[in-house]
Image (cartoon, helix red, strand yellow):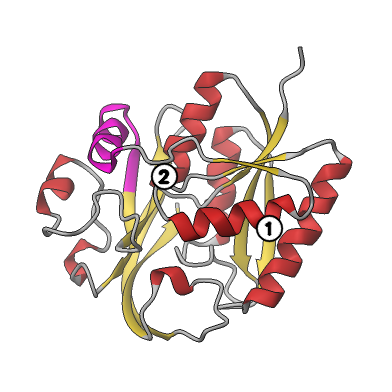
Amino acid sequence: MNKPKAIFNWSGGKDSALALHKVIASGEYDVKYLLTTVSSGFKRIIQHGVREELLEAQAESIGIPLHKLFLPGNPDMEIYNSVIRESLMKFKVENIHTGIFGDIFLDDLRKYREEKLAEVNVNAVFPLWKMNTHELIKNFVDSGFKAVIVCVNESFLDKSFAGREIDESFVNDLPAGVDPCGENGEYHSFVYDGPIFRRPVKFKRGEIIKKIYVSSSNSSEDYTRVPETVFRYCDLMLE
């Protein structure tokens, strides 16, 4: 029996890596593409700020073709929904009717994804849904994954966390109230090695960059932001 074909919503970070690892291990789906939204102006992963060439290196090491969706910086929901819908319709021509996501417990985000995929008769799957995030981060480290923090929200974490490795020390240093997987937008990460990789992605750390975002009601990223939020990004460069 043929496995259902799927696209995987790939952010380049920890939750995506764990979810993809779980999907591959289960053998339930045939993941045909990694799907990532990239800023058309800056050539970086939207939200995470990771350079496009590092994203490409990840996909090459994983061995699954990468499909990039180029969007303007901080796109409004109308543009975002239009680009996503157009891509999903193209995937359906290849008999791909499943989208897989690494979300854990953001109910509004899951509802949004399910509704948008349902509009074009695509099924949404969430392999990590409602799993304990303390156990997930421990599993991430114990499984041999390697990742670096590329973005921190200063509403939750100070700038010293930007550029740190995700390891036992990092988890122990997280302040009370911060989700260990950063599921409330506390931080974002870049995974560069682990069981889904054929070889490590080699990179070097650059400068720490401060950015202030002011959200609008039409932003596609509002679920992680208050009206004005300070972020610290650790710039990574491919070696």
142 sits left or right of 177 in the view:
right
The quadrant in which residue 129 appears is top left
Residue carrying label 1: 116
Give the Cα separation between the discs numbered 2 and 1: 21 Å
Magenta region: which residues? 132-147
In the rendered view, tell whether residue 11 sits above or below residue 19. below
Residue under the point 33% across and 81% down = 229
131 sits left or right of 155 in the view:
right
* Image marks 2 and 1: residues in contact by CB distance under 8 Å: no
Residue carrying label 2: 15
- x and y, in percent, of residue 224 in the image: 40, 69
| Structural crowding at the residue carrying mark 2, measured as other residues with C-alpha within 10 Å and reported as few (<14), some (14–19) or many (≥20) | many
- Count of numbered labels shown in the rendering: 2
Residue 133, magenta (yes or no): yes
Question: Is any atom of residue 197 visible in this view?
Answer: no
Judged from the image, the secondary structure of the residue bearing numbered disc 1 is helix
Residue under the point 29% across and 63% down = 186
Q: Amino acid at mark 1?
A: Lys
Question: Is any atom of residue 24 visible in this view?
Answer: yes
**N-term-proximal mark, 2 vs 1:** 2
- x and y, in percent, of residue 84 in the image: 71, 60
